[in-house]
Amino acid sequence: MSITPAQRLRNLLQQPNILLIPACFDALSAKLIEKAGFSAIFMSGFAVSASRLGLPDTGLISYGEMLNQGQNICSAVTTPVIGDGDTGYGNAINIKRTVKGYAQAGFACIMLEDQLAPKRCGHTKGKQVVSRDEAFTRIRAAVDAREEGHDILIMARTDARETEGLEEAIFRTQTFVELGADITFLEAPRSIAEMQHYCQQVQGYKMANMVEQGKTPILSPAELQNIGYHLVAYPLTLLNTAMQAMQQALQQLKNGQQPQQLLSFSTLKEQVGFDDYYREEERYSSS
């Protein structure tokens, strides 16, 4: 019997070192993360909204669009993928459907948050969170879906630090653990002291979010592990570097220059998968 993506992630979480998780935005970026040797991948809602729609992460992308992107990503890699499930796209019944859909798409874990719809990136202005009862209902519904046979981990995120303060955010993450969440994620702590306080007060696996030039201090994996984190995501690093490289290449083309920072054509073909395709094609052609 083959091991499920969720079980792969559970096994990784039991290892002693902090789990480094770069974020992808499509199947190609997911394959690059896997080829680089990372053990897990995060599908960033910010990055998917930007790359698929060319729109900001302000609740404009739908469940169906996120699910479709996730299906393409999960089918392109064997590395376990954590999927951004936003607010779950509705009430408790919607959330159960979302969890089921993400599990069937091949995700190892789904992240669900307590923002008021339409949600938005955790490091931008205008965030609001739902009441405690609504936040807890969302996680209870997600855990119910998992317990009903959909093998997927539940990451429970709170954005309450911004609007309600650190202690409320900690209370919510503590309750998420009691409700059965596998991982908690307190978004956008403002200082190392806040990060330490969260890790000291909340049991279970905890994820740090390293958004370059965001609200949270950027720390090394070793520093984060010493604080008490078990996972660290880099949600915008690849999108940021890809956009910068494309802008530079476009400016060079506009100036009549040939961009120099290019992969060789053979490497480009290999990364996309031509070599694997040719080998498979030859196998069937010779049979």
Image: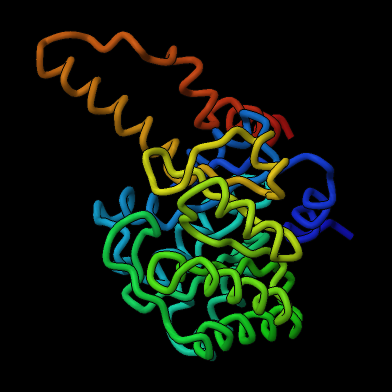
Image coordinates for residue 33, horizontal then vertical, percent = 57, 36
Q: Quadrant of residue 219?
A: top right
Image coloring type: rainbow
Against 212, residue 282 (above or below) is above
Q: Is residue 186 found left or right of 200 in the rendered image?
A: left
| As drawn, 190 above or below 98 | above
Q: Position of residue 263 (x, y in %)?
A: 43, 15
The percent coordinates of residue 137 (x first, y second) are: 57, 88
Image quarter where the C terminus lies is top right
At x 48%, y 77%, the residue is 88
Q: Does the rendering let one see residue 24? A: no
Residue at 42% x, 72% y is 63
Quadrant location of residue 83? bottom right
- Side of 73 where 54 appears, left or right: left
Q: Is residue 238 left or right of residue 194?
A: left
Total residue callouts: 0
Residue 243 visible to an observer of this rendering: yes
- Kindly give the residue lying farthest to the left in the view shown: 255
Query: Which one is in front, 95 or 188?
Result: 188
Which residue is at 55% across, 70% downward? 167
108 or 132, nearer to the observer: 132
Above or below, 133 against 17 in this view is below
Looking at the image, residue 72 lies above or below residue 88? above
Residue furthest toward the right?
1
Q: Residue furthest front?
A: 193
Quarter containing the N terminus: bottom right
Image location (x, y in percent) of residue 284: 68, 36
Observer-nearest residue: 120 or 177? 177
